[in-house]
Image: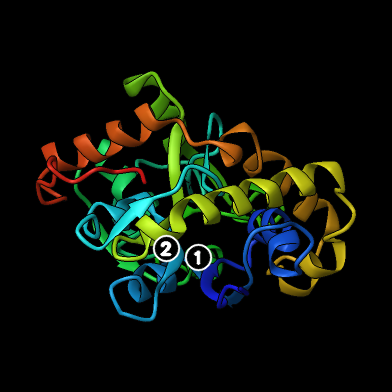
Amino acid sequence: MDRPAVNFAFSPCPNDTFAFHALVHGLVPGLPVTPHLDDIEALNIRAATDAAEVTKVSMAAYGHLRDRFVLLRAGGAAGFGVGPIIVARSPRAIGGRIAIPGERTTAALLLRLLGRFDTVAMRFDQIEDAVLRGDADCGVLIHEGRFTYQAKGLTLLTDLGSVWEERMHCPLPLAAIAIRRDLAPRLAPVVDQALRASVEYAFAHPDASREYVAAHAQEMDPEVAARHIRLYVNEYTLALDEGAVRRILEWGQREGVFPSADALPVFA
């Protein structure tokens, strides 16, 4: 019997379109999916609605959604050297008005490693220009911003991923693929296997997704997209570090950001 298509939401960023190209286009066995692509903060917000079945979510958002979702091991974003960065127009102390790429993003959560600040949320691709215009004193950059800020004349103040690694001694889990808890008993193993197969296909056929990646990339420079993929699609995209995931969830609880949900399993 043919399986009905599962709604699968992920970002249009190069790491996701590269990793999930094979799954979306039926190039690996598993199950058909209906793709929904949007900015990660939009996905975080959508995950609180019934529209989300299988979705990428920031770890910071997942801390508020554990009653609705359980995580899959494949398809996530994590690693060393992958963290958000804080930039400004010139060297200065971190402070003032700080632009963040959404209240529910892991970037916003990690800013708490340095203290409490006055923040303003906006789409990730608007932050560089907001800082350059002076609408924000500092900006927290994710995605392609890590590779473009210097060319735009911005100065690196600190790397939040490095701060995390130094304090927590583990890779930084940025985001994961989550499946609704009511669907997990039936679909989680199939979806997880399909996600892993898609990532493995991407590694084995790195040029197959070129047009798909280019069609959705915010930054049109192919070299920026290639650097983005090399950094964010790695061994942790095949299997998240479960200890690191639990560490960020426990830290978020200690910070008073996440509600306590210790009785709920994190992974399917």
**Left or right of 97 on screen, residue 32:** right
Query: Could you classify mark 1 by the number of other residues whose Cα lies within 10 Å: few (under 14), some (14-19), or many (20 or more)?
Result: many
Q: Residue at x 19, y 59 (%)?
A: 67
Which of the pair 52/234 is nearer the observer? 52
Q: Residue at x 39, y 20 (%)?
A: 166
**Left or right of 116 on screen, residue 126:** right
Residue that carries the numbered disc 1 in the rendered image: 124
Q: Which colour scheme is used?
A: rainbow
SS at badge 2: loop
Q: Position of residue 142 (x, y in %)?
A: 52, 53
Q: Distance between the residues labelled 2 and 1?
A: 5 Å
Query: What's the amino acid at mark 1?
Result: Phe
- Return the residue found at the far front: 1
Could you tell me if residue 210 is visible in this image?
Answer: yes
162 to 77, vertically: above or below: above
Residue that carries the numbered disc 2 in the rendered image: 101
Q: Position of residue 78 (x, y in %)?
A: 51, 39
Q: Are marks 2 and 1 in contact (CB under 8 Å)?
A: yes
In primary-sequence order, the first of circles 2 and 1 is 2
Query: What's the amino acid at mark 2?
Result: Pro
